[in-house]
């Protein structure tokens, strides 16, 4: 039992150290030429634009179901007008960044890991080194930077769609007065709530891209290894997003 705990602890510490070293190396190459602008914009499109629809759809129905549930709870206290503020605060502070991070992890984080993992097992990463191209600068840095920038933009869309979904259910279906619905949002939601949510989403963007790159970068075992690394990347990214969400919430609020 003790040896199992020891091996697990050493493995966890070693993996944490490798992830940290990969992040520091990517940060180092961020400020050194050549600047691969084309790869960066390609990743912006892949991580951001291609994830837009799934983020919008998920956030819309999240706002709708949140409005539905809070309405039935607040109706017991004759506080139905607070549904709008509750939906808006929940989306801007927590649900918007978290839903965006999890959806992008499932769609883009897994693809990043599979792509780099395939390059690793087919020795394309080694070929980059032979051609005097640093693999971290070429593969990791553009993806991490794109995730850091594009996740807050997706979170803004997520917040807006969630509030829109809450408005549709609250005003159009449950017959809450539209003016009171919006007035409570203006009254209770502050810019600090939105800013803190965007900070969270930036951290989530770094986490999901870095973990995807790390798992792909250290893939071994052929096609089976690529599948295993992709699964591990999604699970690890999702867990780290939820854990870091709690830590950031405790610090910010």
Image (cartoon, helix red, strand yellow):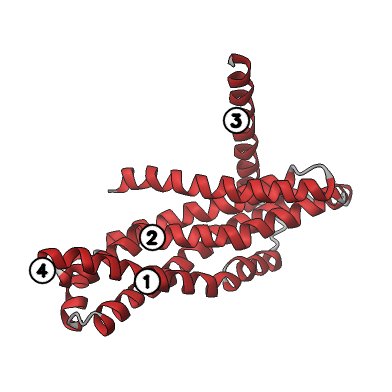
The residue at which mark 1 appears reads as: 162
**Counting residues from the N terminus, which is met first, the one under dot 3 or under dot 4?**
3
In this view, which residue lies farthest toward the bottom? Answer: 172
The residue at which mark 4 appears reads as: 78
- Residue drawn at point x = 37 percent, y = 74 percent: 160
In this view, which residue lies farthest toward the left? Answer: 78
The residue at which mark 2 appears reads as: 95
**Counting residues from the N terminus, which is met first, the one under dot 2 or under dot 1?**
2
The residue at which mark 3 appears reads as: 12
Q: Which label belongs to residue 211? A: none
Q: What secondary structure is marked by label 2?
A: helix
Q: Position of residue 125 (x, y in %)?
A: 82, 50
Query: Decide: marks 2, 1 in contact (CB < 8 A)?
Result: yes
Q: Tag 3: Cα neighbours inside 10 Å, few (<14), some, or many (≥20)?
A: few
Q: What secondary structure is marked by label 3?
A: helix
Q: Which residue is nearer to you in this view: 30 or 67?
A: 67
Q: CA distance from mark 3 to mark 2?
A: 29 Å
Q: Position of residue 156 (x, y in %)?
A: 41, 69
Q: What secondary structure is marked by label 4?
A: loop
Instruction: Tell me: 5 left or right of 88.
Output: right
**Counting residues from the N terminus, which is met first, the one under dot 3 or under dot 2?**
3
Q: CA distance from mark 2 to mark 1?
A: 9 Å
Question: On the rendered image, what quadrant is the N terminus found in?
Answer: top right
**Counting residues from the N terminus, which is met first, the one under dot 4 or under dot 2?**
4
């Amino acid at each position: 039992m003790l040896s199992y705990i020891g091996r697990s602890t050493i493995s966890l510490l070693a993996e944490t150290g490798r992830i940290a070293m990969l992040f520091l190396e990517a940060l180092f190459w961020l400020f050194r030429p050549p600047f691969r602008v084309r790869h960066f914009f390609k990743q912006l499109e892949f991580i951001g634009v291609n994830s837009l629809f799934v983020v919008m759809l998920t956030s819309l129905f999240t706002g709708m179901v949140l409005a539905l549930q809070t309405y039935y709870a607040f109706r017991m206290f004759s506080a139905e007008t607070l549904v709008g503020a509750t939906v808006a605060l929940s989306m801007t502070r927590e649900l918007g960044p978290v839903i965006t991070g999890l959806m992008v992890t499932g769609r883009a984080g897994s693809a990043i890991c599979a792509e780099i993992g395939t390059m690793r097992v087919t020795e394309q990463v080694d070929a980059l080194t032979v051609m005097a191209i640093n693999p971290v600068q070429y593969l990791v840095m553009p993806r991490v930077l794109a995730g850091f920038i594009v996740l807050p933009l997706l979170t803004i869309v997520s917040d807006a769609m969630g509030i829109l979904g809450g408005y549709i259910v609250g005003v159009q279906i449950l017959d809450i007065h539209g003016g009171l619905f919006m007035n409570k949002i203006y009254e209770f939601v502050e810019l600090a709530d939105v800013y803190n949510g965007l900070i969270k989403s930036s951290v989530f963007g770094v986490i999901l891209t870095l973990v995807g790159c790390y798992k792909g970068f250290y893939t071994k075992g052929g096609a089976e290894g690529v599948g295993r690394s992709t699964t591990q990347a999604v699970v690890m990214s999702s867990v780290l997003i939820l854990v870091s969400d709690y830590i950031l919430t405790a610090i910010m609020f």
